[in-house]
Image (cartoon, rainbow, N blue to C red):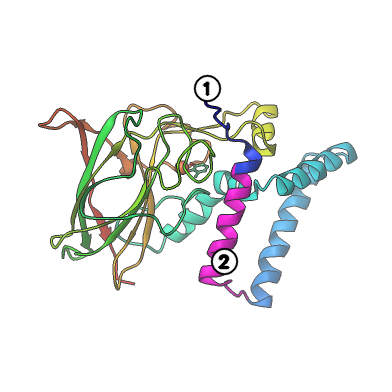
Amino acid sequence: MTTIESPTAAASGASASRAVRDATARHGQAATSQERLDTVARAVLGAVHDVIREHQVTYPEFQAAKRWLMALGESGEWPLFLDVFVEHVVEQVAAESQQGTVGSIEGPYFLPGQARLPAVCTLPMRDDEPGTPLVFAGQVRALDGTPLADAEIDIWQNAADGFYSGFAPHLPDGLLRGVVTTDGDGRFEVTTILPAPYQIPTDGPTGTLIENADWHPWRPAHLHLMVRAEGHRTVTTQLYFTGGEYLDDDVANAVKDDLVLDPAPGSDGRLRVEYDFVLERA
Ligand code: MBD
Ligand code: FE
């Protein structure tokens, strides 16, 4: 008999926190001025004070909030919590000054350094990978329409059981992750499986908040993408699928109409979907 270690919020929280620390080590820490820190930190605290006054928050509620925030830190769920409930607004603000392919949030489960794959490829998967096969094809172009050869499309997604490799011990490292390089005409064609709706871990503090407030913990099925090309701004986005659950009710508020695709059977009978990426100059 094989035992499958079931993923826990604490284990995936620890992995997500490690990913944040590794990214900081790679990219360094962005400096902010004392003036900017004063402005933003004061505004955040002011907003919290306003909520306490407006809703007449009591001492027992304040102590419960303190315990919950401590648990959030101890479980490593700060990255999950912030990406689910806050990142979409940061992304919307960034999008106000961007052109080309519409972005969406990165979320907590990106891992760098995945397998490098040719323009026509299959994402790393097991022999009998569960799920519906999907062919995802398209082209990467500059804003003026020039095809971008040797662009990198970093793809990550969950398995049919809903979990992401690197954040769930029962999945092999690198599963359903890869960096695809476009061909001379900027094109790519990736074989994968349809991602599954994603449920925020219910056994950690983020799940406790969702359950106790009677919200729901689901994101619609999505592919994550980070598209890079020399001299161009990197685009981080997600693609969704028409007819799927939670498209209108994403717990992370990260769905945009332009990013919802409609796969249909191709000539070989497999589901196929096309999407082109347009990058502005850096
Ligand atoms: C995810 O898979 C995700 O994409 C986001 C944004 C938050 C939590 C889990
Ligand atoms: Fe995701």
| Corner quadrant of residue 151 | bottom left
Mark earlier in primary sequence (2, 1): 1
Residue placed under numbered mark 2 in the picture: 24
In-image side of 79 versus 93 (left or right) = right
Report which residue position mark 1 lands on: 1
Amino acid, disc 1: Met
Q: Residue 170 carries which label?
A: none
How far across and how far down the image is residue 70, in percent? 78, 47
Q: Is mark 1 on a helix, strand or loop?
A: loop
Residue at 15% in and 27% down:
269
- Compared with 176, 28 (above or below) is below
Q: Can residue 51 be seen in this view?
A: no
User: CA–CA distance between discs 2 and 1?
Assistant: 41 Å
Magenta: main secondary structure equals helix
Residue reaching furthest to the front = 1
Residue at the image point whose x is 37% and y is 35% from the top: 195
Task: Give the residue displayed 30% in from the left and 28% down from the top.
Answer: 132
- Residue, far top: 1
Residue pictured at 57% horizontal, 58% vertical: 20
> Is 144 situated above or below 7?
below
| Mark 2 residue element | helix
- Magenta range: 12-32
Residue 36 picture quarter: bottom right
Q: Is residue 251 left or right of residue 116?
A: right
Residue 47 x %, y %? 71, 53
Camera-nearest label, 2 or 1: 1
Residue 258 percent location from the top left of the image: 31, 44
